[in-house]
Amino acid sequence: MFEIPVFQRNYEWDREQCQQLFKDLTVAAQTNTDHFIGAIVYVTETGNKMSHIYRIIDGQQRLTSLTLLLKALSVADEHDQAEIEEEYLTNKYLDDSNHLKLKPVEHDYEAFYSVMNRLDFDKPSKVIDNYRLFQKLIKSSDIDSSKLYEAMNHFNMVYIELSSDPNEENPQVVFESLNSTGVSLLPSDLVRNFLLMRLDSQQQTILYKNYWVKIERMFATKTFAEFIRHYLVVKTHTSVKKNGVYSSYKDYFISNGLSSEQALADLFKFASYYDQILNHKSADDQFNKILEHINVMDSKVVFPYLMLLMGLVDTAKINQEEAIHIAIGIRQDGTKEVLNYQVAPTESTGIWTELLGTLIKQGVKDVLLFVADGLVGLDEGLNRHFPKAKRQRCLVHIGRNLMNKVRVKDRKAVINDFKQVHRAANREAAELKLNEFANNWHRTYPKLIKDLLKMPNLLTFMDFPPAIRQSPYSTNLIENFNKHLKRTTHHKEQFPTEDSLDRFLVSQFNVYNEKSLKRIHRGFKGLQDTLEASFI
């Protein structure tokens, strides 16, 4: 019996390849000449009742197509039917695979069994499609089916048997050599074969069903390859090129001394994270909103970082609810400084009141403007400690929120219209642009526009000199610093104690402050006197 191992690809020959095979057969019948059709590489195992099982390493697509062609010829030619069935298609002494001499992969088995037993099969399948194509080609051929069957003897094939002895030739190495030319296998195919080909048939089946087939169901082919590349970024902390995924995975597997089961279990765990990211379906609703926005923005570069965080949460190395709240200030002279921070599970009045109170203790006497993204509890803290300070809602965050709540086809137009608000020359023009935006979209999104117009502090930044308005209309300054922190923590999987986290954060703040105190923020040069006068 020829057995196609579980790790091999599904049957994928297209119509063109089957037509070429049949064309080769007709030429052989017409010219009475031999035709070389390729090679079959296999490893021999002993099955039940001393039977021989030939596990196909390479050539399974060709072998399956030839079997379908033989079946079509047996149906077309009653005279040769019994001979074809008994010699090439079935083995009445073999119980495995329902007496069939070829056992395809599980994905194709039901369709293949239906063809071999002439049963109806109504699901999409290339096995069915190509079998029917061969039937049609045979029926429309000028050559009699018995002569076509006889011409099959002109097909020459090389059979290469590899030893199953682990001390001799490695089937995986041979497989890679045979597939180094022609149509390249995808990285996911190569990784699958690398992990499963080294095992015996029983282990292959168990691990394939327990892990690999479940991962395949999560992803389309292209996404699967992207997942493995991002997985390697998490594991190796280095960038991985698209054409280097397989070699990088082999290096990672070998250097870490993994077994196939360990490797597949870990791939499956991270694949579940990746699936949650792609479909924003984690157990946390707030996190899902973030994931949805990331997918809208097509920001896949952060996927490895997200998988790393999800893994750390699962192993209780970090608390998913913990967050770092940071306050960055710009002085009148344009220099910047991280003023303070607070690590806390959630935003609240207490957190912001405490942080703002600490600023006063540090010597902050007055603040002209606070820019934030509607943070919970911040207004109460400001009313207590800095009641005279003006406030500005982050327009970038509002724009992102608008994008998440409108139809995909409208997103580009909505965000482009909204950007005209902060690009206006003065407050009067900005108010006009905001009203134009509302008029353009209120019929399509009435509740969204109503909520937007209710928001306070949308245009406070217009009270400041034009040269610096690029800064106070958004929280981009803090977001850029947060990105810097994420890049810095990329190689650091965990902080064993809160004290170690504090030490790390303070060191990063000191580096930032040292650089920022020597630089004037964009637009602030020459405006110190104007800004100082605003405090009076």
Image (spheres, grey):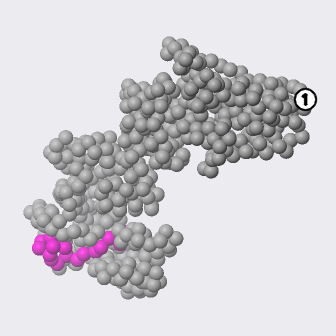
Disc 1 crowd rating (10 Å Cα; few below 14, some 14-19, many 20+) is few
Residue 250, percent from left and from top: 47, 30
Q: Is residue 58 visible?
A: no
The image quadrant that residue 283 belongs to is bottom left
Choose between 125 and 86: the one closer to the eye.
86
Residue type, label 1? Thr
Choose between 196 and 404: the one closer to the eye.
196
Residue pictured at 26% horizontal, 71% vertical: 374
Give the total number of marks visible in the rendering. 1
In this picture, which residue range is highlighted in magenta?
A: 379-396
The image quadrant that residue 267 belongs to is top left
Residue pictured at 18% horizontal, 69% vertical: 377
Residue 393, percent from left and from top: 30, 73
Is residue 420 depicted above or below 33 in this figure? Answer: below
Choose between 43 and 145: the one closer to the eye.
145
Q: Is residue 150 visible?
A: yes
Residue 166, percent from left and from top: 49, 16
The residue that mark 1 highlights is 31
Screen quadrant of the N terminus: top right
Is residue 54 depicted above or below 289 in this figure? Answer: above
Residue pictured at 19% horizontal, 57% vertical: 345
Instruction: Please say whether residue 391 is one of the residues in the magenta stretch.
Output: yes
Instruction: Please say whether residue 116 is one of the residues in the magenta stretch.
Output: no
Residue pictured at 61% horizontal, 28% vertical: 99
Residue 178, percent from left and from top: 63, 27
Drawn side of residue 499 relative to residue 28, left or right:
left
Q: Secondary structure at mark 1?
A: helix
Screen quadrant of the C terminus: bottom left
